[in-house]
């Protein structure tokens, strides 16, 4: 039996990361962002839900946390009308050639007014929507014609090789990373559960966003295969978790839903809407690690959430 119900292979991998080279080979990560359909689906979901939550104008400047293997979500934002995109990550993953291929595929999806992909390989992508047809009320024909102008698209595609419209940042906690009060929308997809300095992340978002700007974060609170129960990571002691994590660049911060609610309020955001994904908890409170002994029933049953907030 391994500490706190942690999986054997996760403990062994954490130990193995102290061997030179192991973390470099297996620790790059990068998420599920290689597919244009995935990137299109994610961006359109955030955009549709942001408009429903009060973002009435198309965002001019978009920042994304943890884009992963490709900058496809940000590229989708640019193709649909944004003028500038910031990509913030711990490790630089994306490459220009792949981004150009994703760009061409995304242009085709927008040109065909493709419905928002869902189901099949994308059945776990959140948030779920009431309808998945192309959101003409959000992206009107006049805006799309201007956004898809061939000269504009050519400039955007050429800009993927420079900092003209896409700016990559790996030191994104630096207060000087981008201009203050300049961003309209900060979004992420299954990223904030991996950010170690969560307080610093919300502080940075507060600095970047213009007054009235919005955050849109889909957060996954599950154990990410570190234990058998989906919420079993809250039964693992801090000491055992340190061994399990090893020298990985990131794993999980294990912060529950309520921590994000608190941090939003502390950093000057009003929660516009929160769409929770819940699952039954089989944990006994006596099995919770001391750090998580006081988790609410809501936290113990919340396995995901779309949280959209507006800067005061």
Image (spheres, rainbow, N blue to C red):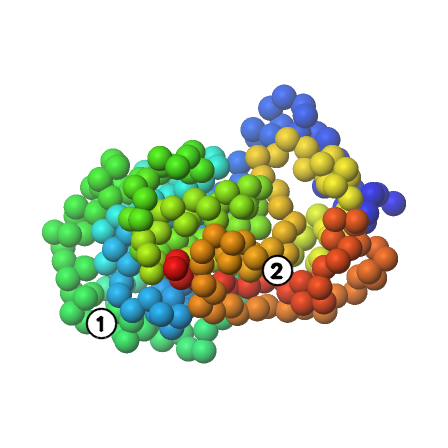
From the viewer's perspective, tell me whether residue 197 is left or right of residue 93.
right
Could you tell me which residue is drawn at 35 percent across and 51 percent down?
209
Q: Quickly name the residue at label 2.
A: 258
> Of callouts 2 and 1, which one flags the residue occurring earlier in the amino acid sequence?
1
Q: Quadrant of the N terminus?
A: top right
Q: Distance between the residues labelled 2 and 1?
A: 37 Å
Residue 251's image quarter?
top right
Circles 2 and 1, Cβ within 8 Å, touching? The answer is: no
Q: In which quarter of the image is the C terminus?
A: bottom left
Could you tell me which residue is drawn at 64 percent across and 65 percent down?
302
The answer to which of 273 and 264 lies nearer the viewer is 264
* Residue 130 visible in the current orientation: yes
Mark linked to residue 140: 1
* Residue 32 visible in the current orientation: no
Residue 18 image position (x, y, % from top left)? 68, 25
Could you tell me which residue is drawn at 53 percent across and 46 percent down?
199
Could you tell me which residue is drawn at 68 percent across and 37 percent down?
245
Residue 90 image position (x, y, % from top left)? 48, 37
Q: Which residue lies furthest to the top in this view?
A: 20
Number of marks in picture: 2
From the viewer's perspective, tell me whether residue 164 is left or right of residue 269.
left
Secondary structure beneath dot 1 equals loop
From the viewer's perspective, tell me whether residue 5 is left or right of residue 194.
right
Above or below 309: residue 210:
above
Label 1 CA crowd tier, 10 Å (few <14, some 14–19, many 20+): few
Q: Residue furthest bottom?
A: 130
Residue 285 image position (x, y, % from top left)? 82, 60
């Amino acid at each position: 039996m391994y500490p706190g119900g942690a999986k054997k292979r996760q403990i062994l991998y954490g130990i193995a990361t102290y061997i030179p080279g192991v973390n470099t080979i297996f620790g790059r990560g990068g998420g599920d962002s290689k597919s244009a359909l995935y990137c299109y689906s994610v961006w359109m979901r955030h955009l549709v839900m942001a408009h429903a939550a009060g973002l009435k104008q198309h965002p001019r400047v978009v920042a994304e946390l943890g884009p992963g293997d490709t900058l496809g979500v940000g590229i989708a934002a640019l193709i649909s009308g944004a003028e500038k995109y910031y990509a913030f990550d711990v490790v630089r993953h994306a490459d220009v050639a792949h981004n150009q291929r994703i760009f061409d595929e995304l242009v085709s999806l927008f040109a065909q007014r493709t419905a928002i992909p869902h189901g099949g390989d994308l059945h776990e992508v959140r948030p779920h929507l009431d309808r998945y047809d192309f959101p003409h009320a959000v992206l009107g024909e006049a805006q799309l014609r201007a956004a898809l102008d061939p000269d504009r698209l050519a400039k955007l595609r050429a800009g993927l090789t420079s900092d003209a419209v896409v700016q990559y940042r790996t030191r994104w906690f630096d207060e000087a990373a981008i201009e203050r009060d300049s961003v309209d929308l900060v979004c992420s997809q299954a990223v904030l559960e991996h950010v170690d300095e969560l307080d610093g992340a919300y502080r940075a978002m507060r600095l970047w966003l213009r007054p009235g700007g919005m955050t849109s974060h889909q957060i996954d609170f599950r154990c990410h295969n570190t234990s058998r129960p989906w919420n079993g990571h809250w039964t693992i002691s801090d000491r055992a978790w340190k061994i399990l994590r090893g020298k990985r660049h990131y794993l999980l911060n294990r912060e529950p839903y309520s921590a994000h609610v608190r941090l939003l309020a502390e950093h000057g955001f009003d929660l516009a809407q929160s769409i929770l994904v819940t699952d039954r908890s089989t944990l006994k409170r006596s099995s919770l690690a001391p750090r998580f002994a006081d988790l609410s029933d809501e936290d113990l049953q919340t396995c995901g959430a779309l949280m959209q907030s507006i800067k005061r």
